Image (cartoon, rainbow, N blue to C red):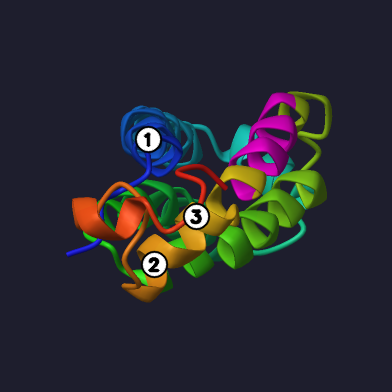
Amino acid sequence: MTARPLSVSIVAWLLIVVGTIALVTMTVMIVGINTIVTSDAVAAQQLRDKAVLPLEVLFAILLLGTAIVPIAGIAMLNQKNWGRWLYVVGNPAVTAVGFAIGASENMIPSIIFYVIATFFLFLPRANAYFSGAPTARAAPVADVGRGSLPFG
């Protein structure tokens, strides 16, 4: 068993917590918008005119895109390389949708976190963790004295 690097644990838990909060928030927002659409025909038409996609499709994309984040975090904690790639590839796709609907200035913290998280997810220890290769922390004591450094 390969020891999970602290950086992967921190990134994964942040993705789980923040992603779950975002998923709940997105669901509440969609329910609110749906209430407006069903109760006010004028507001509904204005929303449909501004939307780049049909509202139902946009809602589905936003919910699925938001669900990617905690799912990726859970997979990373379970040493699944596909979880790392789900986040690294899926997050920019969701960000592109965010830009398309006009949330550009709100996306800046998310982009900064994405760059930092991706950096930590591809450090040598993280690569070893996701490949299943033993790391220096998980290596037997006899192997540590062979001149390899315990970091990097």
Q: Dot 1: what SS?
A: helix
- Marked residue nearer the N-terminal end (2 or 3): 2
Distance from the alpha carbon under mark 2 to that under mark 3: 20 Å
Q: Quadrant of residue 106?
A: top right
Pointer 1: residues within 10 angstroms few (<14), some, or many (20+)? Answer: few
- Verify whether residue 112 appears in magenta: yes
Residue 152, how many percent across, how many down? 57, 48
Please name the residue that numbered disc 3 is placed on. Answer: 148
Which of the two marks, 2 or 3, is nearer to us in this view? Answer: 3
- Marked residue nearer the N-terminal end (2 or 1): 1
Verify CB contact (< 8 Å) between mark 2 and mark 1: no
Q: Which quarter of the rendered picture does the N terminus lie within?
A: bottom left
Q: How many marks?
A: 3
Q: Quadrant of residue 124?
A: bottom right
Q: Amino acid at mark 1?
A: Leu
The numbered disc on residue 130 is: 2
- Horizontally, residue 97 falls left or right of residue 86, namely right
The answer to whether residue 10 of the structure is visible from this angle is yes
Q: Residue at x 49, y 54 (%)?
A: 147
